[in-house]
Amino acid sequence: MTTTPARLTVLAGPTAVGKGTVSADVRSRYPEVWLSVSATTRPPRPGEVDGVHYLFVSVDEFDRMVERGDLLEWAVVHGRNRYGTPRRPVEERLADGKPALLEIDLQGARQVRDSMPDAHFVFLAPPSFAELERRLVGRGTEDAEERERRLSTARVELAAAEEFDQVIVNDDVQRATDELVRGMGIPTR
Ligand code: 5GP
């Protein structure tokens, strides 16, 4: 019997492309896939649960995590809040031979590429920029200024697709999820 070492998969992509929706679909249809819970200094949105969607921490707590080297990667996203991946749970998961998935921004993905080049890097792309803009407006969770900030980040980020091992177009959430988990060696159903 051959065993393939468990691999880390990193899902990145521009804002509002639907990374969160794809992660939620992974969570509900493929509970065997372990998803990293990021720490963030951003306040929770309605319905978000501490320890499930994010670890909501203060700026001081985040500073301490950085100082202690607790984060595998971290970044200031959209020029505002900080987000980072706690290192230990990811390492433990991989040591147990189980696949792990990170859903992070492009800067974070680049840091992971430097420290863990064997990871599998997946770029989630929108069908078009117009569609991305439509989704960002439709979500209605950001004000106009924040939306413009996120769109300008997205414009730069779209050009980064070529740095990735795999590009998945998010034209249909379930199809995109299935393509993602198949790339992790998990049979789809
Ligand atoms: P939101 O505030 O909409 O939940 O997330 C904003 C952005 O932060 C998304 O692009 C998401 O991928 C990114 N993000 C979430 N967690 C992490 C993390 O641990 N590290 C990095 N670098 N980005 C993250």
Image (cartoon, rainbow, N blue to C red):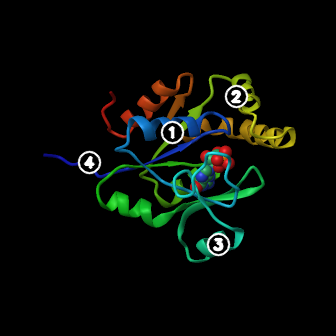
Labels 4 and 1 touching (C-beta < 8 A): no
Queried on whether the Cβ of the residue with tag 1 lies below 8 angstroms from ligand 1, the answer reads: no
* Position above or below: 85 against 12: below
Q: Secondary structure at mark 4?
A: loop
Q: Position of residue 39 (x, y in %)?
A: 59, 60
Disc 3 marks a residue whose amino acid type is Glu
Q: Residues within 10 Å of mark 4 (few under 14, many from 20)?
A: few
Q: Secondary structure at mark 3?
A: helix
**Residue closer to the observer: 9 or 17:** 17
Q: Which residue is label 1 attached to?
A: 24
Tell which tag, 3 or 4, sits nearer the viewer: 3
* Position above or below: 130 against 51: above
Q: Which residue is label 3 attached to?
A: 61
- Which quadrant of the rendered structure holds the C terminus? top left
In the rendered view, does 148 fall on the left or right side of 128? right
Q: Position of residue 89 (x, y in %)?
A: 43, 62
Q: Secondary structure at mark 2?
A: helix
Q: Residues within 10 Å of mark 3 (few under 14, many from 20)?
A: some
Disc 4 marks a residue whose amino acid type is Thr
Q: Which residue is label 4 attached to?
A: 4
Cα distance, mark 1 to mark 3? Answer: 26 Å
Q: Which residue is label 2 attached to?
A: 135
Q: Earlier in the sequence, mark 2 or mark 4?
A: 4
Q: Earlier in the sequence, mark 1 or mark 2?
A: 1
Cα distance, mark 3 to mark 2? Answer: 33 Å
